[in-house]
Amino acid sequence: MPSSTALAFQAPSLALLATEPLRAALDFFAARVGHLAPVQGDGHPVIVYPGLGAGSLSTAALRNHLASCAFTVHDWDLGVNRGPEGMFDAWLPALVERVRALHAGHGRKVSLVGWSLGGIYAREIARCCPGSVRQVVTLGTPFGALGTANHAGTVFRWLGGDASQLTPELQARLRERLPVPTTSIYSESDGVVCWRGCLERKGPMVENVAVQASHLGMPTHPEVLRIVADRLAQPEGRWKRYRARRLLTSPTTAPSRSRTSPAR
């Protein structure tokens, strides 16, 4: 019989996957039409990492919104995310060094925001240099079930990625909690990855925040943009779990349906 873990981590249905492009388009247009209430940031540096097969254009709406909230926003500057070049642990130090350089240049810790596979990068960078990272926010990142229960593996292989390096040891490391405040934003209607694989285990500086969004539309979804800005706007050293506010994206928009789920 299949194990309880196998039952818990199941890939989204093909029917849900098929609706991803349409739902992502709706998320994009909702962000274009609606009005996001500004959040007052403190100017600290933020790096945004795109998902697999995506580049800077895919996170432009998110970066523009964060910039409008007075954060100092940086793209990851490596073009299209085709996965790590070579072995992951040999490729990662260059990304770590950039975070350390921004920390030194700004004199302030750097917040890392990652969508899907980009969230894996953000998490592992923070694990390597926690003294330079203020917090990590991930969008639809299945760090708990990266090797299975998602449809992203096929895309990774199409892009020439080597999935063989995703050893049990590496997968176990990816699931470990980070030494910095961490927010995982996930959607139960995600058509690409298993939402249960995005849930962080219980801890004093972790939270899981649910939204109603497609996987492909997360970087443009108005509610996701608002939550990310809210998390980044917290005073340094005074992190608290997210509490959904009755903020509207437009005068006629229904109240937010986001919720904070207890960490596992």
Image: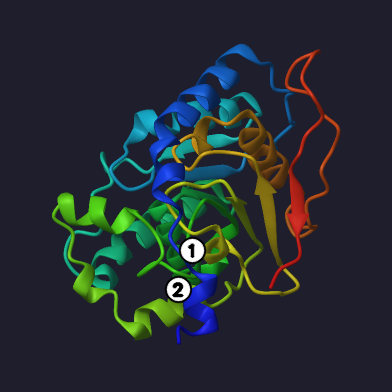
Is residue 49 at least partly visible in the picture? no
Dot placed on the residue nearer the N-terminal end, 1 or 2: 1
Name the element at disc 2: helix
Q: Amino acid at mark 1?
A: Arg
Judging from the image, what secondary structure is the residue with disc 1 in? helix
Query: Where, quadrant-wise, is the C terminus in this rendering?
Result: bottom right
Q: Residue at x 41, y 65 (%)?
A: 149
| Tag count | 2
Residue 77: x percent and y percent?
A: 32, 40
Q: Are marks 1 and 2 in contact (CB under 8 Å)?
A: yes
In depth, the one of 83 and 135 nearer the eye is 83
Which quadrant would residue 34 be assigned to in this image?
top right
The residue beneath circle 1 is 123
Residue located at (43% from left, 64% from top): 125
The residues bearing labels 1 and 2 have C-alpha atoms spaced at a distance of 8 Å
* Amino acid type for the residue under numbered disc 2: Leu
Residue that carries the numbered disc 2 in the rendered image: 174
Q: Position of residue 141 (x, y in %)?
A: 48, 56
Q: Position of residue 229 (x, y in %)?
A: 66, 38
Q: Quadrant of the rendered structure where residue 80 is?
A: top left
| Residue 53 seen anywhere in this rendered image of the structure | yes
Extreme residue toward the front, this view: 1
Q: Is residue 246 left or right of residue 194?
A: right
> In this picture, is 36 found above or below 102?
above
